[in-house]
Amino acid sequence: MNGKTLHDSLDEEFQVFMDLISHDILNINQAVLSSIELMTESSKADERHAKRAVSQIRISTQIFESMKVLCLTRKTGKTPSELVDLNETAKRAISDAANMFPDRQVKIELEESEEVAVVAGGMIVHEALTNALMGMIQLDPSEQASLKVRISRDEVHGVNHWIVRLNDENVAVPPTLLFESISEVSTDARTRMGRMAGLIMSRVMAERLGGAFEMKPTAKGSEFSVRFVGAEVA
């Protein structure tokens, strides 16, 4: 043992997490200011820059709302345990994520589970999925972001799990996200992890619920998976 308590480790991880998120917020604010400056200096209004500013504000709002949820669970030491239908929650998250990008064309196809998919976690389940989708769309450089989402059941050591798989042919797995623990991320690396807030928050939220956030390259693009522990349905 190195003398650190569990509480110390959690505090250290939370400080690194907050530092990572703050870098994204600063970048977003700069993007909004740049769009406003271009619009005010132009002889006529530019709808594209206006929509870009709206998108950045919606992304920033999502980050803040998710941070409020995480801060509340950290303060109370309690995680929401309400049961949610994963198919319905995924549909709502897809709609919310797509609406964050009025400046882009976003197409998201959902393949629901044919079985009833129920997990515990209340609002955190929705936030985890929305943030994952938001983060993946941000990393997609194409004019039209096209994602496929599939919900399926898996079993891990005899325990029922539900996995939401997100596939995008235009996104590569960011090397900066390949860390075992968030506390391992160096100060230098934090400054280079732009547009990662959504994916990082999705990972933190999934792990908070006892699940996992996994990434892997595919034949075309990459697959990000958000794993939740299944709940018993009476």
Image (tube, grey):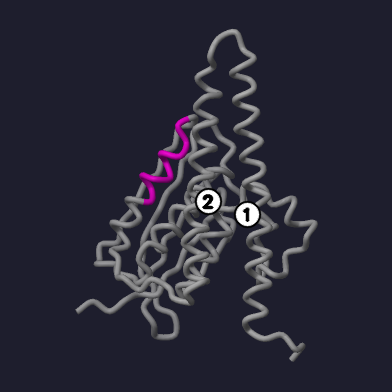
Which kind of residue does numbered mark 1 sit on?
Ile
**In the image, residue 5 lies in the stretch drawn in magenta:** no
Q: Distance between the Cα atoms at labels 2 and 1?
A: 8 Å
From the image, tell me which residue sits under label 2.
63
Q: Is residue 99 above or below residue 123?
A: above
The residue that mark 1 highlights is 21
For image coordinates 67% across by 66% down, the residue present is 15
Is the Cβ of the residue at disc 2 closer than 8 Å to that at disc 1?
Answer: yes
Q: Is residue 74 left or right of residue 92?
A: right
Return the x and y of residue 56 as percentages of the image width and height: 54, 37
Q: Is residue 231 left or right of residue 107?
A: left
**Most frequent secondary structure within the magenta stretch:** helix
Q: Quadrant of residue 44?
A: top right
Residue 110, position in %: x, y? Answer: 35, 50
202 vs 2: above or below: above
Q: Where residue 214 sits: x, y (%)?
A: 54, 65
Quadrant position of the C terminus in the picture: bottom left
Q: Secondary structure at mark 2?
A: helix
Q: Residue furthest top?
A: 43
- From the image, which quarter does the N terminus lie in? bottom right
Helix, strand or loop at disc 1?
A: helix
Q: Residue at x 56, y 56 (%)?
A: 199
Q: Which residues are magenta?
A: 93-102
Task: Between residue 57 and residue 173, name the one nearer to us.
Answer: 57
- Residue 19 is situated, as x and y percent measured from the top left of the image, at 68, 58
- Residue at the spot 37% in from the left edge and 62% down from the top edge: 123
For marks 2 and 1, the one nearer the N-term is: 1
